[in-house]
Amino acid sequence: MKHRYLKNVATLNLACEKCIGCGRCAEVCPHRVFSINERKAQIVDKDPCMECGACAKNCPTNAITVKSGVGCAEAVIIGWFTGSEPSCGCSSDEGCC
Amino acid sequence: MNNEKSCCCSAGNCSSIESITPYDKNDKWVAGELHTAKGKVPVISTKLHFKDILGAWKVRWGIGRMNYKINPGLYAIGKPDNTSPVLVSANYKLTFDVLRKELSGINCWLLILDTKGINVWCAAGKGTFGTDELVSRIMKTGLSEIVSHRKLVLPQLGAPGVSAHEVTKRTGFSVIYGPVRAKDIKAFLDSGYKATEEMRTVKFTMWNRLALTPIELVGAAKLSLTIFGVLFLINLFASRPFGLSDFIAYAGAVIMGTVITPMLLPLIPGRAFAWKGWLLGLLWTLGFIWYNGWLVSEFLLLAIGYLLVLPSLSAFLAMNFTGSSTYTSFSGVIKEMKIAVPLIALSSIAGIVLVLIKSLMA
């Protein structure tokens, strides 16, 4: 059964005019958000995007932007208490991931 | 660097070769060593021993989880030569074990990055499985003098931390992203670096989810000890002390949030994790109240109190599973929390007040 998280929240954006159709985004996306058609990337379905940032990091022309971060409630709560950016608190024995 | 294993020149046959990667010969997973132009490289067994399996079980339960790692550096599988593929991975021992057991019969190099004992995907998110570490590890191991080709195979889930084009610019090595799962690596190598759509897609099977629940349970148990301490103090002057039935009600709500919700995740209606947990917590609490016959006026206050507090607890614990899941986005989690956290807090406080009234003034 397919997992679906909240709709219309992903901050993913693709500037088609900058795309050179290298296909890296489609290669790295863990949820198959991109496809390449006629040497241009396109976003097939934005909702499965989990904002991991792999596509943006590997786009040689910076055509992709996404506000990447950890989709982890515990990290967000720790961030609230410590006043820091939420990140996986893997330094302690507890925590996510 | 990494010359901790000093070369023993006393025997007179010193080859002046030092180890590229420090290792302990007594480790069961070290099968031998290989000499390269840059020094010795440990050869890795592709079989798991009892100790490896026990180690995996322990970290799943949170025992020594943050210190389960191997030395970063270069390792060999089989008898690799200068044309053999180079696979890149993390120095979390669990990751290393999952990878090497899939590599029997293959000759390749393993370039292990220092991810501080964190798995590839999480380390990539933090940036420790990243461009800089990869570039410096290539330099430190002298990889370009050990292999004649200029290709690296990275796990696809390393991509959030690594910028492939930057690695190429800085080292000359081109990056090929391999499959998500180690079990597909053989097919990927055999097919000339072709990954199918299926190999490129992250899944989250019931078995995957179940493997993550022990750590959730351990976390909840630690929190529970504090709660039990407070309840013990309250019991000292309560007219209705907390007892076994309260414990069962509580434990059921915890298990709903930490085990059952993760297990049944896609089957539970709705999308937000807190909602899913709340729903199961509510079903549990309703069932429990009905079974105990608490729907009479004498116990009504307690019943309502528990209906407010226990599903909220399940909701909170289920919400925390977002961090373990493979598909929640930061924006989504923030949206979920903005609604769920205030509701959970209000409902819990109201519920706690009612339960305490019943318990102290019955």
Image (cartoon, grey):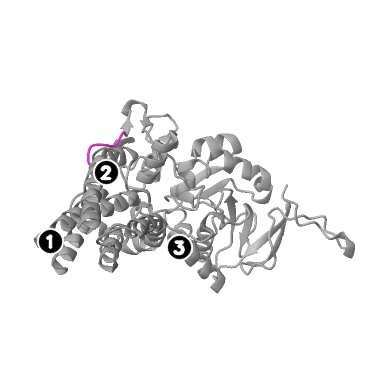
Q: Secondary structure at mark 3?
A: loop
Residue B4 in percent (x, y) is at 75, 54
Q: Amino acid at mark 3?
A: Trp
Instruction: Tell me which label, 2 or 1, sits earlier in the chain.
Output: 1
Residue A57 in percent (x, y) is at 44, 36
Closer-to-camera residue (B359/A51)? B359
Instruction: Tell me which label, 3 or 2, sits earlier in the chain.
Output: 3
Stretch in magenta: A4-11
What is the spatial separation of the Cα atoms under label 3 and label 2, in whole angstroms? 29 Å
- Does B114 sit left or right of A80 as displayed? right
- The residue at 41%/29% (across/down) is A62
Residue located beneath label 1 in the image: B298
Can residue A4 be seen in the rendering of this structure? no
Q: Amino acid at mark 1?
A: Glu
Q: Are marks 3 and 1 on the same chain?
A: yes
Q: Amino acid at mark 2?
A: Ala
Residue located beneath label 2 in the image: B345
Write down the chain letter for disc 1. B
Q: Secondary structure at mark 2?
A: helix
Residue located beneath label 3 in the image: B61
- The residue at 26%/63% (across/down) is B246
Of tags 3 and 2, which is closer to the observer? 2
Q: Is residue A6 magenta?
A: yes
Q: Are marks 3 and 2 on the same chain?
A: yes
Of tags 3 and 1, which is closer to the observer? 1
Instruction: Tell me which label, 3 or 1, sits earlier in the chain.
Output: 3
- The residue at 44%/48% (across/down) is B157
Q: Is residue A56 magenta?
A: no
Q: Are marks 3 and 1 in contact (CB under 8 Å)?
A: no
Q: Are marks 2 and 1 in contact (CB under 8 Å)?
A: no
Examine the rendered structure and indicate whether residue B91 appears above or below residue B125.
Answer: below
